[in-house]
Image: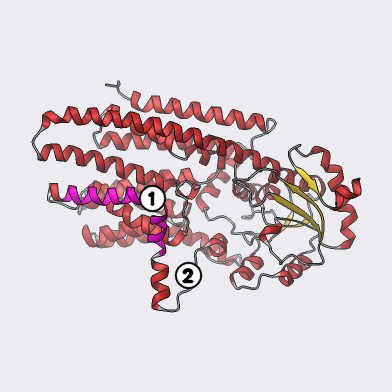
């Protein structure tokens, strides 16, 4: 038997050790400079920096842009940027949040009366199996979301079977968590909706269900009103540009759309098997206990509904993608608690308490095996984690350094906007639409084409465009002159494209851009393959 809290501190040491190894490796390979593994992190950082230094909620310092779907994360970063605008802030925050999440899981497992050895293996599986380190390196909001999801999920499942008000502090706390959850990522509204259903139809706490729904909308409503007064939509532009919008014009098209969530679940066999196991556990526990509504069953059924809704409306299929971290977290928690409770209840039902030790022994062996498998999975995940920061350094950071040196205050058109916005003071034309409302609406209305791109860039006075050609097949203006290309020579896991192209948007800019690219060329990492007009001129 492990001594008290060793079941927490040993996994914690593993967590810290693995993080330090990955951090130091990445820091060294990128020349003593910390680089995040996705360019989106720099969008949040640029926005938060401009809130603090310029009083502007925008990716650039020159105009409002609703380019982030995580309002709360941007505010958290801005709060710390009041102390110091430092590149390490998102990394440190995510690392600390990883430890907090580990502690929350430990407290939940203790509350459910799992013994210390089981808790140890459960936390080791979390430390080794989950996508936590990759998320820390993204510098994004997903660990904040993970903490809020687990707290909301478990607290709501605790309160729902009570049916009457027993703890006012819990009621107020759940209202606060609901608001922060939806303000962190809008899909948190699915979980709140499910909880409202339970409170209204099962707990019969009608007014509380209404208050819960309204409180969850408070944060995004305030931001929506602010965005509206700035001339932008009430929802972040990311939901318009990236949202999964159906085209329903018949009963068949409605059915086809409604079945997409089931198809997404069936696509990942591990996820499908896990959800079927959860459903079986709910049925067996209900039969054994002659009662349906208890904390574990509420968690399990809620998760099954959430799994469908989330898959249906997000349209994602990769269980290990960063957006699925909270989904994966809830899946592990529900499976672990449900399976543990079922085994204990089966033993009590058969009145064979002497078999408990045998079952515990089997459980421990299973814990050892799963932990070893998780360690193997971690070893498979580590190379992509390290590759991600390398790729961003090779491409987006080099783009940012180039713009910082030669076009610091100019008008630049681009489609990967994070690093070039964070490290410069450019006026941006975002051809992906996240930071340019005109572009976003043109995309949404089907008007985004070569003529529109030429018109908007001329209107804004754009001189330089830095884009992935493969994002705009047949759409880039013929009047643009491609001066050069930088190609990342290996298969990519994080980049939007292996080759980024530099365009002069008018003939008068060609000579200047050629000279700039030639001058910058010796500072590029050796791995980058250069091509185009400026290399031919150099020869």
Q: Nearer the viewer, residue 381 or 27?
A: 381
In the image, what residue occupies the spot 55% across and 65% down?
A: 240
Q: Using the rendered view, name the quadrant where residue 7 is placed.
A: top left
Q: Using the rendered view, name the quadrant where residue 82 is placed.
A: top right
In the image, what residue occupies the spot 25% across and 41% down?
A: 339
Looking at the image, residue 530 sits to the left or right of residue 114; the answer is right
* Disc 2 crowd, CA 10 A, few/some/many (<14, 14-19, 20+): few
Judged by its main secondary structure, the magenta piece is helix
Q: Nearer the viewer, residue 89 or 538?
A: 538
Q: Using the rendered view, name the quadrant where residue 440 is placed.
A: bottom right
Looking at the image, residue 293 sits to the left or right of residue 508; the answer is left
Viewer-side label of 2, 1 = 1
In the image, what residue occupies the spot 59% across and 45% down?
A: 493
Looking at the image, residue 389 sits to the left or right of residue 517; the answer is left
On screen, 267 above or below 419?
below
Tell me the SS state at disc 1.
helix
Looking at the image, residue 375 sits to the left or right of residue 21; the answer is left
Residue 246's mark? 2
Numbered range of the magenta stretch: 260-286
Residue indicated by mark 1:
269
Q: Where residue 88 sits in the image (x, y, percent)? A: 60, 36
Q: Is residue 282 magenta?
A: yes
Instruction: Work out which quarter of the rendered image holds the N terminus and state it.
Output: top left
Q: Where residue 417 sits in the image (x, y, percent)? A: 67, 53
Q: Of marks 2 and 1, which one's residue comes earlier in the chain?
A: 2
Q: Where residue 392 sits in the image (x, y, percent)? A: 65, 43
Q: Where residue 87 sits in the image (x, y, percent)? A: 63, 38
Q: CA distance from mark 2 to mark 1?
A: 25 Å
On screen, 380 above or below 146?
above
């Amino acid at each position: 038997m492990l001594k008290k809290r060793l079941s927490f501190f040993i996994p914690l040491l593993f967590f810290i050790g693995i993080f330090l190894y990955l951090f130091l490796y990445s820091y060294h390979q990128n020349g003593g400079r910390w680089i995040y593994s996705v360019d989106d992190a720099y969008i949040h950082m640029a926005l938060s920096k401009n809130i603090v230094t310029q009083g502007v909620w925008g990716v650039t310092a020159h105009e409002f842009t609703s380019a982030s779907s995580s309002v709360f994360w941007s505010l958290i970063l801005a709060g710390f940027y009041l102390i110091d605008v430092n590149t390490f802030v998102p990394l440190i925050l995510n690392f600390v949040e990883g430890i907090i999440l580990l502690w929350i899981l430990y407290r939940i497992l203790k509350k459910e009366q799992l013994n210390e050895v089981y808790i140890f293996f459960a936390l080791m599986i979390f430390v080794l199996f989950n996508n936590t380190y990759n998320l820390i390196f993204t510098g994004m909001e997903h660990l904040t979301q993970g903490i809020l999801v687990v707290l909301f999920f478990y607290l709501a499942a605790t309160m729902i079977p009570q049916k009457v008000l027993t703890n006012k502090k819990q009621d107020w706390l759940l209202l606060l968590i609901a608001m922060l959850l939806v303000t962190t990522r809008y899909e948190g509204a699915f979980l709140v909706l499910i909880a409202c259903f339970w409170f209204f139809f099962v707990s019969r706490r009608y007014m509380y269900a209404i208050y819960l729904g309204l409180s969850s909308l408070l944060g995004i409503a305030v931001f929506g009103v602010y965005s509206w007064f700035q001339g932008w939509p009430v929802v972040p532009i990311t939901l318009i540009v990236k949202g999964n919008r159906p085209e329903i014009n018949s009963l068949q098209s409605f059915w086809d759309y409604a079945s997409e969530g089931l198809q997404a679940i069936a696509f990942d066999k591990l996820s499908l098997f896990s959800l079927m196991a959860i459903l079986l556990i709910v049925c067996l526990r209900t039969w054994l206990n002659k009662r349906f509504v208890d904390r574990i069953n509420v968690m399990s059924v809620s998760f099954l509904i959430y799994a469908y809704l989330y898959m249906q409306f997000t349209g994602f299929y990769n269980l290990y993608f960063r957006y699925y971290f909270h989904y994966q977290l809830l899946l592990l928690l529900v499976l672990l608690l449900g399976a543990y409770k079922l085994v204990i209840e089966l033993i009590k039902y058969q009145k064979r308490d002497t078999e408990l030790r045998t079952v515990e022994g089997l459980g421990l062996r299973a814990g050892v095996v799963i932990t070893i498998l998780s360690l193997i999975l971690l070893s498979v995940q580590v190379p992509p984690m390290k590759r991600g920061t390398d790729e961003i350094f090779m491409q987006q950071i080099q783009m940012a350094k180039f713009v910082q040196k030669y076009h610091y205050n100019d008008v630049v058109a681009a489609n990967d906007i994070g690093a070039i916005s964070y490290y410069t003071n450019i006026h941006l034309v975002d051809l992906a639409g996240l930071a340019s409302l005109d572009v976003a609406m043109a995309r949404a209305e089907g008007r985004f084409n070569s003529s529109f791109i030429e018109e908007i860039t001329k209107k804004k006075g754009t001189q330089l465009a830095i884009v992935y050609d493969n994002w705009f097949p047949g759409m880039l203006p013929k009047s643009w002159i491609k001066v050069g290309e930088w190609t990342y020579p290996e298969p990519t896991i994080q980049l939007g494209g292996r080759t980024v192209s530099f365009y002069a948007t008018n003939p008068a800019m060609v000579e200047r851009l050629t000279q700039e690219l030639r001058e910058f060329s010796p500072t590029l990492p050796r791995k980058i393959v250069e091509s185009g007009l400026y290399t031919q001129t150099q020869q």
